[in-house]
Amino acid sequence: MGAGLGPAFGRLWAATTLSALGSGLATVAAPLFVASRTDDPLVVAGASAVAWLPWLLFALPGGVLVDRMDRRRLMIVIDLVRVVALAVLATAILSGQGGVALLFAVLFLVNTGEIVFRAASQAMVPVVVPRHRLERANGWLSGGATLMHSMLAGPLGGFLFALSAGSPFLVNAVTYALSAVLVALIGGDFRAAADDDTHARRPRSMGGEMVEGLRWLANQPLLRTMAVLIGLLNVTLTAALAVLVLLAGERLGLGSVGYGLLFTCMATGGVLGALLGDRIIARISATWTIRIGLLVEAGLHLALAASRSTIVVGFALFAFSVHGGLWNIVSNSLRQRLTPPYLQGRVASTNLFVAAGGNCVGALLGGLLAARFGITAPYWVGLVVAIGVSAATWRVFNRAAVARAYADPSPVESPAPVA
C-alpha cells in the first residue's frame, strides 16, 4: 500500500477488510433466517445474544492465546475453522436441513474466533508498520471495516438472502478463506517478543496471564482512562441506538427507508473519519482529537434528545461517526505505542471485552429507560454521562502526557516481517 505502509500491511488490511465483509453478511442474514423460521421475539433476539456472548466469555482468555502463539498462524487457523463451520451451515440451509439451533451454534463459534482474530490483527500492526505510520494504518483498517461491514454488507446480505437463505453464509465462508490466504502470504515471525528477565517473571497459567495484562493496564493512566471511557460511552451509545428506530418514527416521522438513511449517515462519517484521520490528528494533535470528540459525543445525545429535525439528527450522527473513526485511530495507536510486545494481545482483548460489556449493558438500559421515562430518556442520560466524563478526564489527556506517548521509544517496535 502507499504512504509507506508496505505490502505486508496491504495483505493484512485486505484480510481484515474481507473478514469484516463476511462478518457483516452473517450479521444481516442471521436474524433474517431466524425470522423466516419463527415469529417468537425471544428467539429472534437470541441471534444477537449468541453473537455478543462470546465477547464476554472469551475476550480475556483470547488475549492470552494471542500473546502465547504466533499471531499470523493463529489468524490462519481461526479463518480455516470458520470456513468449515460456515460451509456446513450453508450446505445444511441450502439442502433444507439447517435449523435455528445449528445457526446459533455456528454464530457462537464464528464470533469466538472473531475476538481472537481481531486481537491478533491489532497486535500485528506495530510489527508490519513503521511507528510513525501507525495512525495511517489504523485509519485504513478502521475505514475498510466500516465500509464493508456497515455500508456494503447490509444491502449485499439482503440481496443474497433473497436469492437463497444459505447464500450469505456461503459467501461469508469464501471471504474467510481468502483472508486466510492473504494472511499466509505475510512472511515473518509474529510470536510476541520479550527480554529474558521479563519472560522469566511472567505467570504461565491462563488466569495469571490475564491478571498480568489487567494489572499492567490498570497502571497506565492514558490507556486505563481510554478503556473506561470506551465502556461508559458504549453503554450510552448502544442505549441510544437501541431505541433509535422508535425515535425515528415517533419524533422524526421517518419510515424504514429514512431510518436506514440515518445509518448511512453514520457509516459515511465513519469512513471519512478513518481515511482522513491521520491528517486531522497531525493538524490538531491527539489531545484535542480526544477532547473535541468527547464534546461531539455530548452534542449527539443533545441533538437526539431535543431535535425533531431529520437534518439535524442526520448531521449529528455523521459528525459523531467522524469522531468515532478518529477515536479508533488515536486509541489503537496509543495502545500499540505504549504496550510491550508480550502484552499486545491481552491489552487489545481487554479493550474488546470492555467495549462488548458496554454494548450489552447499553442495549438493555436503553429499552428500560425509554419504557420507564419516555423515548428521549436514554439521550438525556447519555448527555449527562458525556459531560461528566469530559470534565473528569479532560486533564488526563493533556498535551504533555500524550506527547510523551508519541515521543518515547516504542516498546512495540520489532524487525519488519518479510514482505
Image (tube, helix red, strand yellow):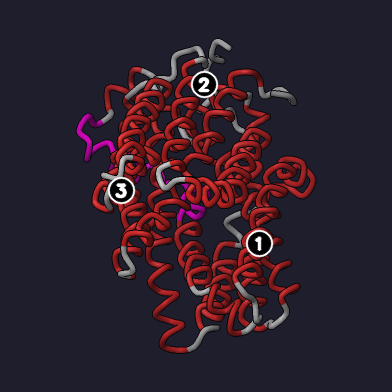
View extreme (right): residue? 283
CA gap between label 3 and label 1 equals: 34 Å
- Label 1: how many residues lie within 10 Å, few (<14), some (14-19) or many (20+)? many
The residue drawn where x is 71% and y is 44% is 277
Quarter holding the C terminus? top right
Task: Identify whether 17 is placed above or below 130.
Answer: below
Seen from the viewer's position, the closer of residues 409 and 95 is 95
- Asked whether the viewer can see residue 60, the reply is no
Look at the numbered disc 2 and give the secondary structure of its residue. Answer: helix
CA gap between label 3 and label 2 equals: 27 Å
Which mark is drawn over residue 228? none
The residue drawn where x is 62% and y is 50% is 151
Work out whether mark 3 precedes mark 2 in sequence or the reverse, and give the earlier one. 3
Q: Which residues are magenta?
A: 203-227
Look at the numbered disc 1 and give the secondary structure of its residue. Answer: helix
Q: Which amino acid type is marked by label 3?
A: Leu
The residue identified by callout 2 is 182
Work out whether mark 2 precedes mark 1 in sequence or the reverse, and give the earlier one. 2
Q: Main secondary structure of the magenta part?
A: helix
Q: Is residue 286 left or right of residue 356?
A: right
Task: Identify whether 185 is placed above or below 315.
Answer: above
Q: Is residue 311 left or right of residue 374?
A: right
CA gap between label 2 and label 1 equals: 33 Å
Q: Which amino acid type is marked by label 2?
A: Leu
Counting from the top left corner in percent of width and height, residue 252 is at: 66, 80
Nearest to viewer (mark 3 / mark 1): 3
Seen from the viewer's position, the closer of residues 5 and 385 is 5
Q: How many marks?
A: 3
The residue identified by callout 1 is 320
The residue identified by callout 3 is 103
Q: Is 224 covered by the magenta stretch?
A: yes
